[in-house]
Image (spheres, coloured by chain):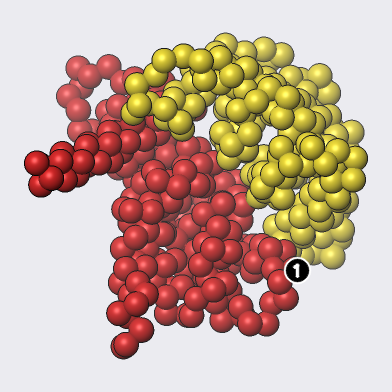
Chain colours: A red, B yellow
Amino acid sequence: MSATLEGPTTTDEFIKGLWKENPVFVQVLGMCPTLAVTNSAINALAMGLATMVVLVMSNAVISLLRKFIPKQVRIASYILIIASFVTAVEYVIQAVSLDLHKALGAFISLIVVNCVILGRAEAFASKNDLVKSLADGAGMGLGFTFALFLLGAVREVLGSGSLFGVAVLPASFQPWVIMILPSGGFFTLGSWLLFFNYLSKRKARKAALATAEVAS
Amino acid sequence: MNEEPLWTIFLNASLVNNFVLAYFLGICPFLGVSGKLATASRMGGAVTFVMVVSSLCAYGIHAVLMAIDAPYLQLISYIAVIASTVQLVEMFIKKVSPTLFKALGIFLPLITTNCAILGLALFQTNKGYNLIQSVVYAVGAGLGFTLALVLMAGIRENLALAKLPDVVKGTAVALMVAGILSVGFMGFAGLGG
């Protein structure tokens, strides 16, 4: 395609959600489910995947309908489209695993108000074609799942000494109960943000050093 | 039907199970508009109002949906009601106080996607509260949200004066503060049994 020379390619749209524009760590969006359901790795993964499915589907539909939705009522229309998909996903989860449905509780329905989804609809799917919107949805969804998994894994290992329900730390390890309590969520996410801040600061410093050396 | 006395519902919603610090609902405005004390308390007021109105509507909708046997429409109709209430509040604030309208900025329309409000509607339905219980629950949750927001804003106003390393600035330190606040709120557990 000739257009790929100017704009970002479909692959770029997919990749950016994973790292450079990671919805959780970089854009700090969708905090509520991020903190609420990440007390174990399996819950975090399930939540991430459910969100990803809704994100991809709603991005696709909104991208297809973008020429038909009047500008004034677009937010309301997006929300209704998203709510329909969330309802479908909720019934599917209930049918597949009742335990998971109980563990996630009202937070499955609350995917509707996840700002990541509405954010992508407004910022991306309403302006781009179907293929790019699909790639963007999948990338953002994967990035979101990845971030949730990082949080869930840390909290489960430290809070109950296990990962996916399998003990990974020796029995002598005293679990840090606070990590699976609400405050643990804030602390873990805060620490991850610190880590990512540190990485980007170091990268910026190295780049500055490199240019200084070239100049001298 | 749920027989919980009103005062435990209120205590539960506002302190013990504070929507922000225990349920993680409404984190976006919590981190977004907690920079200034004045804005935070008004945002809390707006959210409380939307909560009470949508709680009343959710109660009515739930009764209707049960009558026509269409529970799968619950989510869609709740969110539609919340979106219209927010629109109403937005027009009202714009008319009454343009300054406040500017200060709240994007976070005003974003009340629609404030999970605390949809969460409230869903929780009250799950718990089977009657009309009065629902309203008390909504008021309690709204006040709890306002309390958390105001506490956070007070701390962040002082934090702005503190000398912090570059890495910690911004969201990271806000989250740490929220974590410590949340530990504090755990002390309310067991209150009102």
Q: Is residue A21 left or right of residue B180?
A: left
Indicate the position of residue A109 as horizontal and vertical percent values: 61, 53
| Label 1 secondary element | helix
Location of residue A32 by image quarter: top right
Q: Position of residue B171 (x, y in %)?
A: 46, 32
Q: Quadrant of residue B163?
A: top left
Residue A136 percent across, percent down from the top left: 42, 67
**Image quarter of the N terminus of chain A:** bottom left
For label 1, count other residues whose C-alpha is less than 10 Å away and answer few (under 14), some (14-19) or many (20+).
few
Tell me what residue is drawn at x 62 percent, y 13 percent. B188
The residue closer to the viewer here, A125 or A38, is A125
Evaluate whether residue A104 shows in this view: no
B82 w.r.t. A34: above or below = below
Q: Residue at x 84, y 65 (%)?
A: B68
Q: Chain of mark 1?
A: A
Does residue A152 appear in this view?
A: yes
Q: Which residue is mark 1?
A: A72
User: Which is more toward the observer, A150 or B8?
Assistant: A150
* A202 lies above or below B88: above
- The kind of residue tagged 1 is Gln
Position of residue B162 relative to residue A49, above or below, is above
